[in-house]
Image (cartoon, helix red, strand yellow):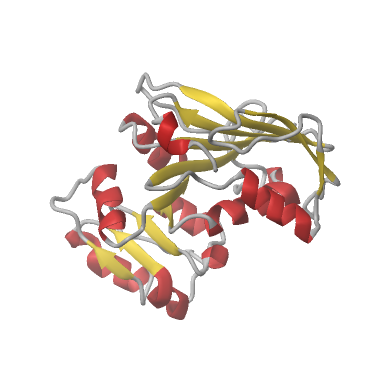
Amino acid sequence: MTLPMPAPREFRLLWSDGRVAPPITPGSVIDVGTDEALAELDRLYAPPPGPWVRMNMLGTLNARAAGPDGTSDSISNRADRAILRRIRLASDAIIVGAETVRQEVHMATGPRRLVVVTNSGDLTGHHISPAIAEQRVTVVCPRSAAPTVARTMPGASMHHPTGERFGVDAVVEWCRSHGLDRLVVEGGSGLIAQFLDAEAIDEVCLTQAPVFGDPDSPGLPGSTAPRRYRRALLAADDLGFVYSRLVAETADASSTEVN
């Protein structure tokens, strides 16, 4: 039996840098579930102008990224999902790995392009129809994986970087060559770790759920890169979830100030 997703009533703004994130009144409350709330989330999570790469993830108190059902749905809530949708709508493309597209329902990424990164090409188990795949899915994979992609995700277009193994720079380069400048990487943890190690993430959007997860469930990504991130926005809801925007310290502040 699937339990209904929790629905917080209030989203309280705690702190903003007033630069990447817009100025706020600390302690002010958004009434979640209204059209006005969605407009305010659009304002709070708007990316700066120009090319920008975000990661967006949800984790538990012990940094687990999935709940008992093996997906993030069972540790999420409706405010977190609303933020997910606003970030997607503010992006040109959503980037995910094969495991994520197999486990999570990505039908709702439209009208944004879904870019799936895979080495094997095996996308068995996804929830994307051939018609939707043809309209807005691109699979980045080695040329040798093309037959498997065609079999397991019919309709999707493909891009084959040079070589059998490729880095995240090849993925970003393809996106930008097609006018997809604002990107959000949603998982899995292994793919995000590659972006972090390459110092290709400009911003981290993170929701922390007020629960502990199974220690054997997938965890949040790690990184060997020394890059640091500074907080740009902090908020919380009445269910105990905490929401953050963090920006890489190397980001050019002059180009990321909000108007």
Tell me, yes or no, if residue 73 can be seen here.
no
Outermost top residue: 226
| In the displayed structure image, the side of residue 18 where residue 160 appears, left or right | left
Q: How many badges with numbers are in the image?
A: 0
In this view of the protein, which residue sits in the foreground, 119 or 186? 186
Residue beneath the point at 58% across and 30% down: 232
Residue beneath the point at 63% across and 52% down: 42
| In the displayed structure image, the side of residue 63 where residue 166 appears, left or right | left
| In the displayed structure image, the side of residue 250 where residue 47 appears, left or right | right
Outermost left residue: 163
In this view of the protein, which residue sits in the foreground, 236 or 240? 236
Choose top left, top right, bottom left or bottom right for residue 2. bottom right
Residue 147 image offset from top left, x and y in percent: 24, 69
Q: Is residue 255 above or below residue 178?
A: above
In this view of the protein, which residue sits in the foreground, 122 or 21? 21
Residue 88 image offset from top left, x and y in percent: 54, 56
Outermost bottom residue: 131
The quadrant of the image that shows the C terminus is top right
Residue beneath the point at 18% across and 61% down: 143
Residue 46 image offset from top left, x and y in percent: 56, 47
Q: Is residue 252 above or below residue 186?
A: above
The quadrant of the image that shows the N terminus is bottom right
Choose top left, top right, bottom left or bottom right for residue 169. top left
| In the displayed structure image, the side of residue 19 where residue 61 appears, left or right | right
Residue 80 image offset from top left, x and y in percent: 68, 47
Residue beneath the point at 47% across and 64% down: 112
Tell me, yes or no, if residue 164 can be seen here.
yes
Q: Is residue 122 above or below residue 18?
A: below
